[in-house]
Amino acid sequence: MQQRELKAYRQEIINAVRTLLDGGVMQLSKHGNMSLRIPGTDQFLLTSVGGLEDLKEDTICLLDMEGNLIEGYISPVAREIVGMHSVVYQHREEVGSVLHTHSPAATAFAIANREIPVAYEAQVRFLGTIPVPVAGYGPRGSGESVANIAAILRENRATGGLLLANHGTLTWGDNPATAVHGSVILEESAIATMAAETLGGAKEIPAHMLHATHNRVAEFEERGAEKA
Ligand SMILES: [Zn+2]
């Protein structure tokens, strides 16, 4: 791996995290972690400290899928959650980046152990056609927790993220920007769904429309931008 390439990938994480923090969706502590799989390898970069603020290139380490540290430094608090990231890469070969936060509204669903229903269109467009599932509780990054995440991934359910019971969120995508976008949409959906509770409750998108809603993004992206 060329150092120049690694530097560019680290910068990709830093830029995406900056977008996340600027978006104002994070919880007070700004705790979270993000990873990026190096394409064509079994290695990934992971933020190596407890929070996402003031991220620098030397607070992003390189690991392999077994969790062996290849380059850089990893703090105990980041070491705890290595498996929470690698499990996603091991089950989803198309995934290039994973993000974990405690964004407040989505975490409210997580601590209530409640799925987020398919009621907000943007959620269905960007996260998938099923309610955002809840992976059962286990202490952060533990064998139990990782096994519960793996169980959802193994079912190959159409979701770009999940809730970690009593803990927070996990979103993923083909790159850090997509994983951040998923996290923002997840939080928006949780806020809107809770607000709808005071108005009689969120109404789900009709089941027969879900795939059309989700596929519309790709259909129009395939056509590309138009210019008169
Ligand atoms: Zn956490």
Image (cartoon, rainbow, N blue to C red):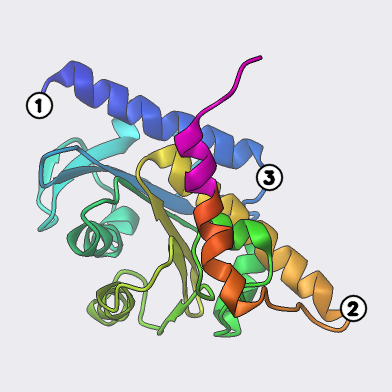
**Which amino acid does the dot numbered 3 rest on?**
Gly
Residue 44 picture quarter:
top left
Image side of residue 151 versus residue 121, left or right: left
Residue 202 position in % (x across, y down): 76, 77
Q: Tag 2's secondary structure?
A: loop
Image side of residue 123 versus residue 10, left or right: right
Pointer 3 residue: 24
**Total numbered badges shown on the rendered structure:** 3
Residue 39 picture quarter:
top left
Mark 2, other Cα within 10 Å: few <14 / some 14–19 / many ≥20: few
* Tag in front: 1 or 2: 2
Name which residue lies at 68% across and 58% down: 188
Would you say residue 48 is visible in this rendering? no
First in residue order: circle 3 vs circle 1: 1
**Which amino acid does the dot numbered 2 rest on?**
Leu
Q: 134 or 76, which lies in front?
A: 134
* Residue stretch rendered in magenta on the structure: 217-228
Q: CA distance from mark 3 to mark 1?
A: 34 Å
Pointer 1 residue: 1
Residue 23 position in % (x across, y down): 66, 41
Pointer 2 residue: 199
Name which residue lies at 39% across and 35% down: 13
Residue 58 position in % (x across, y down): 30, 29
Mark 3, other Cα within 10 Å: few <14 / some 14–19 / many ≥20: few
Quadrant position of the N terminus in the picture: top left
State yes or no: discs 3 and 1 in contact (Cβ < 8 Å). no
